Each structure stands twice: as structure tokens, then as C-alpha cells.
Amino acid sequence: MPRISRRISKMMAPGQAGYAWPELLKFLILAALLYWLAQRGVEGLSYNWQWYRLPSFFWTVEQGTLKAGPFISGLLVTFRITALSLVLAFALALITALFRLSNSPVARLAARGYVELIRNTPLLIQIFFIYFVLAPIVDMGGFTAAVLALALFEGAYASEILRSGIISLDRGQWEASASLGMGAYATYRHVILPQAVPLVLPPLTGQAISLIKDSALVSTIAIYDLTMQGQAVVSETYLTFEVWFTIALVYLSITVSLSLAVKAMEKKARAKS
């Protein structure tokens, strides 16, 4: 059997190599076509590109001291909003998922109402409602309102992801826990959640990436995150394309880095198991 498998691998290797070259050629042709279209578009715009001015919006040197520019300041605000929203969204998602699976009709109804209300209304409307209606009543600041709006929105989607992971586990896990005398809390903590969370980690990562991108909407309530700082720079310098392309690249770098980090964690977890 080992000899047969080696022969098959040797026979398949040339075919796979021959298959890779046409695919690489297709990719290069597509890249060249996209580059040509971009060049034609730039020529048609007759735009005076000023990329050399962008580094000053990231950092400046004043009296020998490195000082953060508006992009770095806005990026730090974006990180703060995203980190706090992620923690709160996961907590809301876990509570909502457990409520959906509980035996209490009131808890199930409340969780279902929350999920349906949030998922079927636009995030921008929710941000406006919390900031302009709810925040003045409870004396809530704009930053807190932004974090709450993002956490409520992403938590509703993440709760369904968590719930699907929990119900996908075999019923025997519950029965084995009950036979050991474990209560609901101990069962969830020691048996169910440690198995369910790794299963739903990829879609949860997608929700985290979505939250990072959705955080740009908080600029509509005067939160000086990365997007709002970009708008301020554009209004002052008229570097429209340079600024927005750069900000898009920053968001792309953050989300790709998060995806790669989660993939590395998954590989490490699989290697241990």
C-alpha cells in the first residue's frame, strides 16, 4: 500500500504542476487588466495626486518629538471602540443564546424580540436612536452610545452563531453531564461552551471583522474615529482619493491581520488536539 500511494503521488504531481501554470497565467492577465483599467480611470480624472502629503497625517516631528497625526489619533479611537464593543457584544451574545435555549418562556421571548428587532433594522438608525433619543435621557456620552450601539448590533448576530454551535453538539453531552450530577451552569462552563466556541470561531471572526468595518458609522455622531478624521482631513486639504484609499487600506490591514491571527490560533488548537 505505501508503494502504491507513492506511485499515485508521483503520477499526480506533474499534472498538478501543469494545472498551476494556467491558473497563474489567468491571475496575471486579470491583474494586468485591472491595472490597465485603473490607469485609464486615473488618466480620465486628470487628478493631481499628492501622495507625498499623507505621512504628515500619520505622524509629525515637532521639536525632535514624534507626535501622532490625525490618522493615528482616529485609529486609536477606533481600536478603543472596537475592543469595548467586542467584549460587550460577546457577553450579550452569550446571554441571549442561553436565554434562547432556556426553559423560561419570558427569557426566550425577550431574547427573540431583541434578536429580531436588531437584525431587522439598519445599524445607522440604531446609532441615531441611541445617541439622540436614549443618550439624553440617561445622560450618556457619545462614545458610550457608539459602543452600546455596535455591541447591541453585533451581539444579536453573534448570539445566533453561538446558539447554532451549542445545539449542534450531541445530546449525549448533556446526558453525560447530568449523570455526573452537574448542573446547568457547570455543564455550560465545563462541557458545552468549551466545545461549542471552537466550532463557531470562524463565523465569530467574521462578525468581529464586520464590527471593525461598521465602527466607521460612529463618525455620523461626531466620534473622531479614523473615518471622521479622514473626513476632516479631506475637508481641509481636498485630498479626496488619497485619503479614502489610505483609510480603506488601513481597515483592510486590520481585518486581514485579525483573520490571520484567528487562523493561526485554529491551527495551534488543532495541533494540540
Image (cartoon, helix red, strand yellow):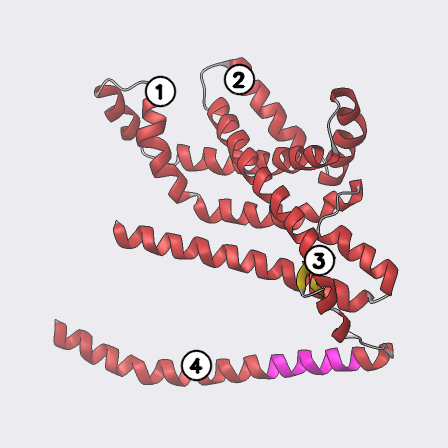
The reply to whether the C-beta atoms of the residues labelled 4 and 3 are less than 8 Å apart is: no
As rendered, which of 12 and 154 lies closer to the eye?
154
Give the magenta-colored segment's residue range: 29-41
* Mark 2 Cα shell of 10 Å, populated few (<14), some (14-19), many (≥20): some
> Which mark is in front, 1 or 4?
1
User: Residue 33 colored magenta?
Assistant: yes
Q: Is residue 229 above or below residue 168?
A: below
Q: Position of residue 181 (x, y in %)?
A: 24, 17
Q: Amino acid at mark 1?
A: Ala
The reply to whether the C-beta atoms of the residues labelled 3 and 2 are less than 8 Å apart is: no
Residue at left offset 67%, top offset 56%: 72
Residue at left offset 55%, top offset 79%: 27
Residue at left offset 73%, top offset 45%: 217
Q: Earlier in the sequence, mark 2 or mark 4?
A: 4
Quarter in which the N terminus is drawn: bottom left
Please give left or right for residue 249 compared with residue 20 in the image. Answer: right
Q: CA distance from mark 3 to mark 2?
A: 44 Å
* Mark 4 Cα shell of 10 Å, populated few (<14), some (14-19), many (≥20): few
As rendered, which of 43 and 7 lies closer to the eye?
43
Query: Could you tell me what secondary structure mostly forms the magenta stretch?
Result: helix
> Which mark is in front, 3 or 1?
3
Q: Secondary structure at mark 4?
A: helix
Q: Earlier in the sequence, mark 2 or mark 1?
A: 2
Q: CA distance from mark 2 to mark 1?
A: 16 Å
Q: CA distance from mark 4 to mark 3?
A: 41 Å
Q: Secondary structure at mark 2?
A: helix
Q: Which residue carries the number 2 mark?
A: 107
Q: Which residue carries the number 4 mark?
A: 20
Q: Position of residue 152 (x, y in %)?
A: 63, 33
Q: Earlier in the sequence, mark 3 or mark 2?
A: 3
Q: CA distance from mark 2 to mark 4?
A: 55 Å
Q: CA distance from mark 1 to mark 4?
A: 53 Å
